[in-house]
Amino acid sequence: MGVQQEAGVGGEALEVWIDQDLCTGDGICAQYAPEVFELDIDGLAYVKTADDELLQDKGATAPVPLPLLTDVVDSARECPGDCIHVRRVSDGVEVYGPDAG
């Protein structure tokens, strides 16, 4: 299996993280992009790796796969808790989410 191409603005890699302190547990993100987001037993959403490993460390990031960019961005826009952050890997600038531009 080849390396999955990661999304980017202008070809730059993007990563996503969730602020669990603001998560409302609605699960909208997991509906949009179940390959990237999952609700844990605590009722909060977390990002996960391509291998389905839930990343529960505070501020843990997961790469945004290119085919899922639209789903991840829609998740960030529709999230009632405004807790999904998508940023460039290269400089950490948020491109989608509550702190974007």
Image (cartoon, rainbow, N blue to C red):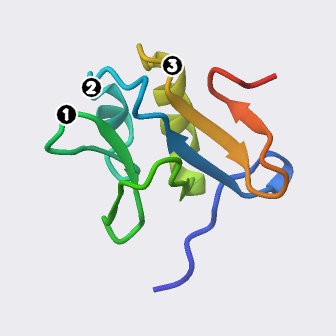
Toward the viewer: 19 or 33?
19
Residue at 48 percent of width and 34 percent of height: 19
Most extreme residue toward the bottom is 1
Residue 22 in the image, given as x and y percentages of width and height: 43, 23
Q: Do tag 3 and tag 1 residues touch (Cβ < 8 Å)?
A: no
Q: CA distance from mark 3 to mark 2?
A: 12 Å
Q: Amino acid at mark 2?
A: Gly
Residue at 80 percent of width and 56 percent of height: 12
Q: Residues within 10 Å of mark 2 (few under 14, many from 20)?
A: some
- Considering only order in the chain, which callout, 1 or 3, is on the residue closer to the N terminus? 1
Residue 55 in the image, given as x and y percentages of width and height: 38, 58
Q: Do tag 1 and tag 2 residues touch (Cβ < 8 Å)?
A: yes
Residue at 82 percent of width and 58 percent of height: 90
Circle 1 residue: 43
- Considering only order in the chain, which callout, 2 or 1, is on the residue closer to the N terminus? 2
Label 1 SS: loop
Most extreme residue toward the left is 41
- Considering only order in the chain, which callout, 2 or 3, is on the residue closer to the N terminus? 2
Toward the viewer: 79 or 66?
79
Exactly how many numbered labels are in the figure? 3
Circle 3 residue: 82
Q: CA distance from mark 3 to mark 1?
A: 16 Å
In the picture, the quarter occupied by the C terminus is top right
- Tag of residue 25: 2
Q: Amino acid at mark 1?
A: Gly
Question: Relative to residue 40, is residue 8 drawn left or right?
Answer: right
Label 3 SS: loop
